[in-house]
Amino acid sequence: MDVEFDERVKGKRFRCRDCGESFEGVGKHPVCPSCQSDVVDAI
Amino acid sequence: MFAPLDDGFLVLEGTSSFLAVARVLRRLPLCIETVEREVVQGLGPDDLVAASAPVGGPLAPALMLIELVRRYGLPLVVLPKDHPGSRRLPVVVSAGPRIRLACGIQRGTHPEQDVLCGGDEFAGLVVSGVPGGVEIEGGPPGLAIRCLPPLSLGV
């Protein structure tokens, strides 16, 4: 187990407005991993 | 140095290792999987996918790996630190707007997408995705750069 992972990659939680999927995203342009929509809200 | 690139590959070759780079060309949610977490990296058209072969070897697996990520959206799997399988990875991949090559890291075990394991000769080299191509900073003297067309899988 890479115990440093939590400290090294900080993601934010998002929820997709189109399909309801919630996910941890990184990067400037969060995209839903289930439906590829970029209409997502930070939660 | 700016290198124009469309939907093909840019291959940066040193004496004993190489780096293949391609543009993502679309909006892509790249899933990064570890033992306990899934993180989704949002990529855009000008971002890059890079495959590095720190000890050299055939080019084809690197190009295939890039296509598996950018065309088919396969997730990246991050090995736990000190995992014995790290030494079995001849090619490792990373994605993002800017990718820096480092030689002092363990193949396949680091989740940060801005750092990629490379051969010693590529230490410090940085590739950045820009509209219409790739900006290359650093790299060894005599670095050979060539452009290849996209793979034609036909299936």
Image (cartoon, coloured by chain):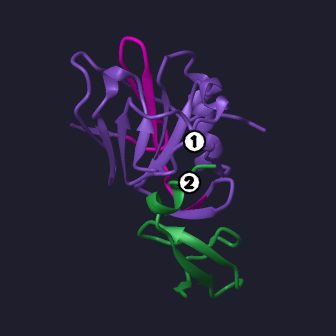
Residue B1: x %, y % from top left: 21, 37
Q: Quadrant of residue B102?
A: top left
Q: Which tint is chain A?
A: green
Label 2 – label 1 distance at C-alpha: 8 Å
Looking at the image, residue B128 sits to the left or right of residue A38; the answer is left
Q: Which tint is chain B?
A: purple
Which residue is disc 1 drawn over?
B81
Above or below: residue A35 compared with residue B110: below
**In the image shown, does A38 or B123 lie closer to the viewer?**
B123
Q: How many marks?
A: 2
Which stretch appears magenta?
B5-31
Label 1 chain ID: B
Q: Are marks 2 and 1 in contact (CB under 8 Å)?
A: yes
Any magenta on residue B20?
yes
Pointer 1 local density, CA inside 10 Å: few below 14, some 14–19, many at least 20: some
Any magenta on residue B152?
no
Tell if the residue under mark 2 belongs to the same chain as the one under mark 1: no
- Determine the secondary structure under disc 2: loop
